[in-house]
Amino acid sequence: MTHPLLAFMATPMADPETRALRRMRHTWVLLCAALILAVALNPASVSLFGPWGALPALLLLMATPIVGMIYWRAKTRADAAWNRSDHPKGEA
């Protein structure tokens, strides 16, 4: 049994998924995981470094949705292009 996050990262999202889309998907998932870790460790980070300790969580909080929007727009465009293209049904 694999973890759902690992299964998500291994599953192509666009048909066919390009290297750039795969790289963006992996980047976005890793940013999400880093954000979870930064939020969980935020109290310890702030107690160690003062107000500057919250900076990693803040930067990840801003970067994650931006990369996510870029990825999902590119994925939607790739899916739409694939659906418009002339290819036999059932062929990936």
Image (tube, grey):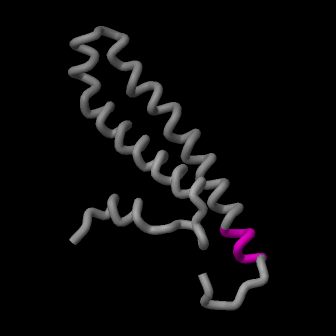
Residue 22 on image: x %, y %: 52, 57
Position of residue 36 relative to residue 89, above or below, is: above
Residue 66 in which image quadrant? top right
Residue 46 in which image quadrant? top left
Q: At 60% across and 81% down in the image, what residue appears?
A: 92
Quadrant of the drawing holding the N terminus: bottom left
Q: Is the magenta stretch mostly helix, strand or loop?
A: helix
Q: At 66% across and 54% down in the image, what residue appears?
A: 73
* Furthest residue toward bottom: 89
Q: At 71% across and 61% down in the image, what residue appears?
A: 77
**Side of 58 relative to 80 (left or right):** left
* Furthest residue toward top: 50
Magenta stretch: includes residue 21: no
Position of residue 63 relative to residue 8, above or below, is: above
**Side of 7 relative to 45 (left or right):** right
Task: Give, as a single range, the part of the protein colored magenta.
Answer: 79-84
Residue 64 on image: x %, y %: 49, 39
